[in-house]
Image: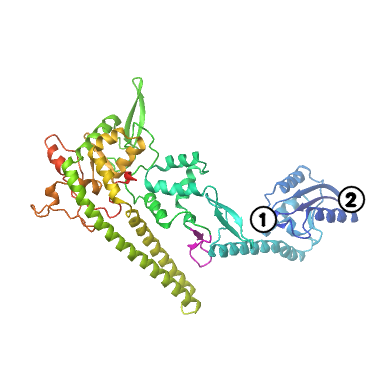
Amino acid sequence: MKMKRAIIYTRVSSDEQAEKGYSLQYQEEQLRKYCTNRDISIVAHYREDYSAKTFDRPEFNKLMNFCKKNPGDVDLLLFINWSRFGRNAGDSYAVIKQLNKLEIEPQAIEQPLDLKVPENKMMLAFYLASPEVENDRRSINVKSGIYRAKKEGRWTTLAPVGYRNIRSEDGRAMIVPSKDADLVREAFQEFASGAHGMEELRHKLVDKGLKCKRSRFPELLRNRAYIGKVLVPAYKDEPEYYAKGIHEPLISEELFFQVQDILDGRAPNRPTKNTLKEQLPLRGFLECRLCGKNISGSASRGNGGKYYYYHCTCGCNERFKAEIANKSFIEFLQSIKPNLMTLDLNYEVLLDTFEAKMKSDRSELTKIEDEISRNNHRLQNAQHLMLDAEISASDYKEIKAKISTANDELIRKKANLLSSQEDFREHLKVGATILRNIDEFYQNATLSEKQLIIGSVFPEKLIFEKDQFRTNRINEAVVLMSMTPNDLDPKKSGRGKNFSPSSTQVGATGFEPATSSSRTKHATGLRYAPKVCKSKPSLTILK
């Protein structure tokens, strides 16, 4: 009788290494003993340390290639049990068919089946389905465990930049601040201040040792882990929400939401991209007069030199020389510069105005904090009602989602108000000094300082047309400090301006620099009716 020839296959996955009876050595010993006792010749042995969820495994692929290249040289494929062969019933049947075409019989020595007997196919289905069921159950248990951990506020995945993974005394996963924590704090503080564009700030922090790629930096600034939150994903019928983490927050919620406002476009005008070009200080602050999209800028070579232009990137052919626009912008700054007498008079008036606003803001802050406290109390009450079975779990989840959303918005408002609680007197003093000679200050400033001046004085985009600039709005502090005594006196000609924090006056569309015939008029009073800023009244460059 012809001796049968066999390939023995042993496999273990990483998560089974410690399980008794699954070691590669044990499997090999049992398979060799089986072949010796039955006078079976071993043609090859393939060892695998890989999951059996699919058959795309390195050693199994080599095994199949060997069988295809050596038809008729192998009669049996032996393994210790069917879970070593595969853990996906559908894929397993497909591979068995391939082996049968090669006239190779797969066989588990601990679960032997004569597949020529039709009834044995029922047992084969059971043996093949059992590992898949086991895999599915294990996956459900893992997902359930991770979900419970996240609900408890534990961070179970790779720690975000600024944290590191550790295990608590009871062996549970958690994160603690790392050596990069201070750099993450600096990232939020600097970005909120407006002192740098996003890419410029990232380069600065990378030079200090922060490891963060360009594509990951916006994600860092959006990550609520830094305010002590853990994202709990949607699971079964439960919606996604943020749980309070057990790890230490790196920044305050107020600072976080200031940054979110900037990222979402609810902040003062600033460049939306890296603008480190001395010749293009206005890039990122301009709007196309034709299509309303952002104006970019770049250099062109010609006549033996390099020439810079501002241009629209949306195909509307708007393009103008940077040299002319930069020069016109300085003239534009000259047109909004108040005379010294007006500036000194308005300085004292604005001190009183902003003092009243600060008092109003402090009152509003108290109301917001009280509302947040009431919302938290409502949430606790709803939790007690759910535990007492007076409301359903789904009703509680709906209430929790609504309260969390409301609190997020209240925290955002609180952040905006807190940002205006700084020493406005010092800001106003420095602002007045800059406004005395804002055109000269701008010309002598660094590129970063120029960008801060532009973004602070002009909260909305600038439009360049017919060698002149116009905009829908100028910083209210600049406008107020430039008003004439007549503008400030409510008894004269009904032209008084409302300086209260609730003022809602809106100016006419556009603000253009004074012509030679109207220069005196603009020097003593700006023809622009302001809407008093409800956030920070002073220039952001004063930080």
Give the distance between the C-alpha atoms of the residues marked 1 and 2, in whole angstroms: 34 Å
How many other residues sit within 10 Å of disc 1, few (<14), some (14-19) or many (≥20)? some
**Magenta stretch containing residue 235, yes or no?**
yes
Q: Most extreme residue toward the top, as rendered?
A: 304
**Which is nearer the eye, 538 or 163?**
538
Q: Which mark is residue 416?
A: none
Q: Most extreme residue toward the right, as rendered?
A: 1
Horizontal and vertical percent position of residue 261:
37, 52
**Magenta stretch containing residue 541, yes or no?**
no
The answer to which image quadrant residue 123 occupies is bottom right
Q: Residue at 55% across / 61% down in the picture?
A: 154
- Provide the residue span drawn in magenta: 228-246
Disc 1 target residue: 53
| Above or below: residue 222 compared with residue 273 | below
Badge 1 or badge 2: first in the primary sequence? 2
Q: Quadrant of the C terminus?
A: top left
* Residue 433 falls left or right of residue 115: left
Type of amino acid at the residue the image marks with label 2: Met
Does any portion of residue 285 appear in the rendered image? Answer: no
| Secondary element at image label 1 | loop
**Which is nearer the eye, 462 or 366?**
366
Disc 2 target residue: 3
Horizontal and vertical percent position of residue 38:
89, 56
How many other residues sit within 10 Å of disc 2, few (<14), some (14-19) or many (≥20)? few
Type of amino acid at the residue the image marks with label 1: Lys
| Above or below: residue 346 compared with residue 153 | above
* Residue 91 falls left or right of residue 235: right
